[in-house]
Image: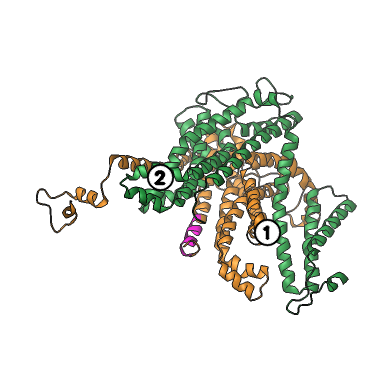
Amino acid sequence: MDISTKNDAVPPPVSPPSEAEQKRAARGATRPGDRIFLGLSRGSGIFLLVIMAAIAAFLTYRSVLAISKDESNFVTTLEWNPTAAEPSFGIAVLVYGTVISSIIAMVIAVPIAVGIALFITHYAPRKLGGPLSYVIDLLAAVPSIVYGLWGALVLAPQLIGLFGWLDDYFGWTGILDWQGGAPRSLFTVGILLAIMILPIITSVSREVFRQAPLMHQEAALALGATRWEVIRMSVLPFGRSGVISASMLGLGRALGETMAVATVLSPSFEINASLLDPGGGTFAQNIASKFSEASEMGRDALIASGLVLFVITLLVNGGARMIIARRAEYSGANA
Amino acid sequence: MSQTVNDRRPSSLQGATLPKWSPYAIAGGSIALGLGISAAAGLDSKIQWGLMAAVFFVAASYGIAAKVEGRRQAKDRVATSLVWVAFLLAVIPLVSLIWETVERGVKVVDVYFLTHSMGLVTDTEPGGGIYHAILGTLEQVGIATVISVPIGILTAIYLVEYGRGRLAQAVTFFVDVMTGIPSIVAGLFILSFWIIILDMGYSGFAGAMALTILMLPVIVRSTEEMLKLVPNELREASLALGVPKWRTIMKVVLPTSVGGITTGVMLAVARITGETAPVLLLVWGSTFINTDPFDGPQASLPMYIYQQYANSGGSGAAYDRAWAAALTLIAFVMILNLAARGIARWKAPKTGR
């Protein structure tokens, strides 16, 4: 009955509607229930953003307090003595340990994860594919502390033989030199982290490989390509960016993993060129192990190192998500 | 080699092929070779003979196939065997982990273990139990679930049903980023905000808040996926009948996707139940039963495992308790996982696929 109000050219005779009323009329009637519901759900979304901002703000605040009292360079110092009369602590050892253990984990996990993803999508009998991906997902469900317990009490003793062998044949490189200590080194941690990040890399790669255009694969088969040639020529090029972002998601996990590392590694605050000798530390492990005996200053110092970890994982994860998002726009697979 | 020649098919379209059983034969041979070499060299590590057998298998299948079928087929066989090896490599740790946990844990788990706390039991002597830890875990996870489920579902509704423009894009991006926050960083945030600045003291509730941060993005993501599966026709039909949008969401959209949302929530619960790091920083741990999550340190199952492992100095009794607690935790998480997937299959929306 009120069509005229929507037409700007013919204003209604009685009172011209205000701008706000016009807007509302254009959107349709808003009922109080609708407004409350929209407010609630938008509020929840904003709450999430506030949490993220608060995490950054509070961590930065405590870190600035800590770093301003640090008597030595926060980036290059090779010791962690925040409680001394002249607090001196630095993240160099932690950066080294975190990067090295994550690199080892990635080198082991990425090829295996791609293999498993290909196995599930292209090699396993179709009926087996579902249950197999479920088994891999179960790996992700195991709590990290149980991985830590298993890594320290089951995996580490098994690695003695392998370490001895690596030392015998590759010890001359210095990197794989082993003095015969307990195998609770960055290398062991890397192997354990590889097992822990396998599921996430596998599940993302699996989804990407599954989307690879069937027409290309059938065309290649029709030209007489073997199954491996089909995969190399049509599946892998299609899935490359997906695999990269999956690996970065896995890297984010490996960087931030706490309990498994804290359980397996026997830490020391020094940079050791050998990967097989025990020692070193990672950001998350250092926080967990040093926390219970830390003073107020010690806690602030740990928070400062946590902030660095937060920023690194933020960059890695944000990068991975951007690659996924960009790919989704022009892949055509989800059209 | 003589069998393979006999097996050649008469068809001229197909070159020489290895018989179907050849991969199994090569696999058996290389495992035997790996075992033999380890036995001869006196190596007792299972990892070593496994790796050796894998290398032998790949090398042998390439060599034999290259000779009989040609290089392209040989490459294909190598790729196939590498893919199989990759899969087996991933299954071995899972099997070993579950096997060891069950074998070592089942010695200690009994009714006494599940119904008593560690109060007055020192770390090195046998006895004691995990009742206080189970209680703490249930309360902390319960509080985290109660806080994060409504906020998570409402956020997902905002993103799917209302979200246009910059705000929705920002929320989507930061939910993704939030999934990647290391659990220890979430713990540090609550530590700096709740314990250092507000000076509130260690409690189960502080741990629950950190768990909420870890749980929220998981719930938002899974709920969002489920809401997107609801067919638009259902929404349009309801709106066309003059039903307000919020009632459409509450009465049509949510009931349609309730199965998937429940699955997502249960998987999120399973995930945070095993979180140790934030609990370690915020709940502090206790060997006594503390039923009040808002006051004083509590225990929690994952933290109990860590403390039994780390504080006992290698005592057998403490390790046994750690394995038993790990078994309890894995059983709980796996049951939750299985139930969640069961619900997902049972209540899956019919999308015509």
In this view, which residue lies farthest toward the right?
B40
Q: Which is more toward the observer, A104 or A87?
A: A104
Q: Could you tell whether B340 is left or right of A270 in the image?
A: left
**Magenta-drawn segment:** A321-330
View extreme (left): residue: A13
In x, y percent, where is residue A126? Answer: 65, 58
Q: Does A91 sit left or right of B46 as displayed?
A: left
Pointer 2 local density, CA inside 10 Å: few below 14, some 14–19, many at least 20: some
Circle 2 or circle 1, nearest the eye? 2
Q: Quadrant of residue A10?
A: bottom left
Provide the letter of the chain coloured orange.
A
- The disc placed on residue B252 is 2
* Residue displayed at 39% across by 53% down: B233
Looking at this view, is A177 or B258 the one in front?
B258
Q: Compared to B350, does A329 lie above or below?
A: below
Q: Are marks 2 and 1 on the same chain?
A: no
**B6, above or below B255, in the image:** below
Residue at image point 35% right, 43% down = B246
Q: Depth check: give the residue in front, B190 or A3.
A: A3
- Residue at position x 69%, y 39% in the image: A149
- Taking the view exactly as shown, the residue that stands out farthest to the top is B120
Q: Which residue is mark 1?
A: A125
Q: What main secondary structure does the magenta stretch of the protein show? A: helix
Q: Is residue A278 left or right of residue B346?
A: right
Q: Amino acid at mark 1?
A: Pro
